[in-house]
Image: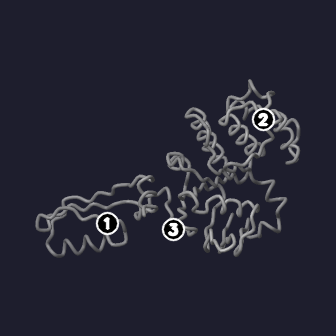
Amino acid sequence: MLEVTGISKNFKNNQVLKEINFKILDGESIAILGSNGAGKTTLIKIMLGLLLPTKGEVSFNNINIKEIRSKYLNLIGVVLEGNRNIYWYLTPWENLNYFGGLLGIKKNDIKKRGKELLELFDLSDVSNEKIDTFSRGMKQKVAIIIALLNKPKILFLDEPTLGLDIITRNKLIDCLLKIKKEGTTIILTTHQLEIVDQIVDRTFFLKEGELFLEKNQNNSLIFNEILIDIDLKKRGLITLIDGDYIQNLIIFLLENGEKINSIVKRNKRLEDIFLEIYRE
């Protein structure tokens, strides 16, 4: 559904992204992880059409998003880190009516959907108060509500849990799981890896502007350790991280008279994978 092809981005002499390629299927949820400065937000902004790539293109249903900009923007919801997609001098309801009107949503639908979202994020009691009096977490809630207002086909979330308390973060996770079940495509960047584990189907790792590795929910063997307990002259365990060689190794060991006591697959935590990738 959404395809990134050969995306590179230079800022003067600094190449931030280098030949990025991947596809996102309809209804799939992905995470783009990386250390600060890896190029995550730049990539997201290019996928939104807010930045032009130096090279490459982003296409939606095989059409360059530049050619269907208005249609594409009406299909997406966005929360960007450090950016205000709401007006602080308006109330939550005024924001809902304003942005809903821009999206062409009927007033009755804005009222119904807005009521649901305000209740979900515990903002009903302050829905008519000016947002500039809100805490950071409350402002983030309103930003997320606006992003969800049009029931987007694609939802972009760049560090969506900044400023949220644990209860609100869990409500956001529940909401994302619900809209994912309804078929919304979710594209997420975050440093809170427990959210990735709960929501995401595939995880992409960006390192120094390049797509470094990919992990899926099936726990591809590159992200696991295979422990083979053998006698092998009393030397103990063999540890593998690549499943392609396991069958051949087992055959080799058996043919050479070795006794295999056990074979265990041990999943690595996402945090461990992240640290291994970005460790100097």
Kind of residue indicated by mark 1: Leu
* 251 up-or-down from 155: above or below: below
User: Could you say which disc has been placed on residue 212 in the image?
Assistant: 3
Which image quarter is the C terminus in?
A: bottom left
Position in image of residue 9 (x %, y %): 67, 71
| Location of residue 7 (image quadrant) | bottom right
Mark 1 vs 2: CB contact within 8 A:
no
Q: Work out whether residue 256 or residue 215 is closer to the camera in this orientation and state it.
A: 215
Q: Secondary structure at mark 3?
A: strand
Q: Residue furthest top?
A: 125
Kind of residue indicated by mark 3: Phe
Q: Which residue is mark 2?
A: 114
Q: Residue at x 51, y 64 (%)?
A: 214
Q: Residue at x 34, y 60 (%)?
A: 225
Kind of residue indicated by mark 2: Gly
User: Could you say which disc has been placed on residue 240 in the image?
Assistant: 1
Is 23 positioned to the left or the right of 54 in the image?
A: left
Position in image of residue 265 (x %, y %): 33, 57
Of the image marks 2 and 3, the number of the one nearer the N terminus: 2
Position in image of residue 172 (x %, y %): 62, 39
Give the alpha-carbon distance from disc 2 to disc 3, as whole Å.
Answer: 40 Å
Of the image marks 1 and 2, the number of the one nearer the N terminus: 2
* 250 up-or-down from 203: above or below: below
Q: Residue at x 51, y 68 (%)?
A: 212
User: Could you say which disc has been placed on residue 126 in the image?
Assistant: none
Q: Secondary structure at mark 1?
A: strand
Position in image of residue 193 (x %, y %): 50, 49
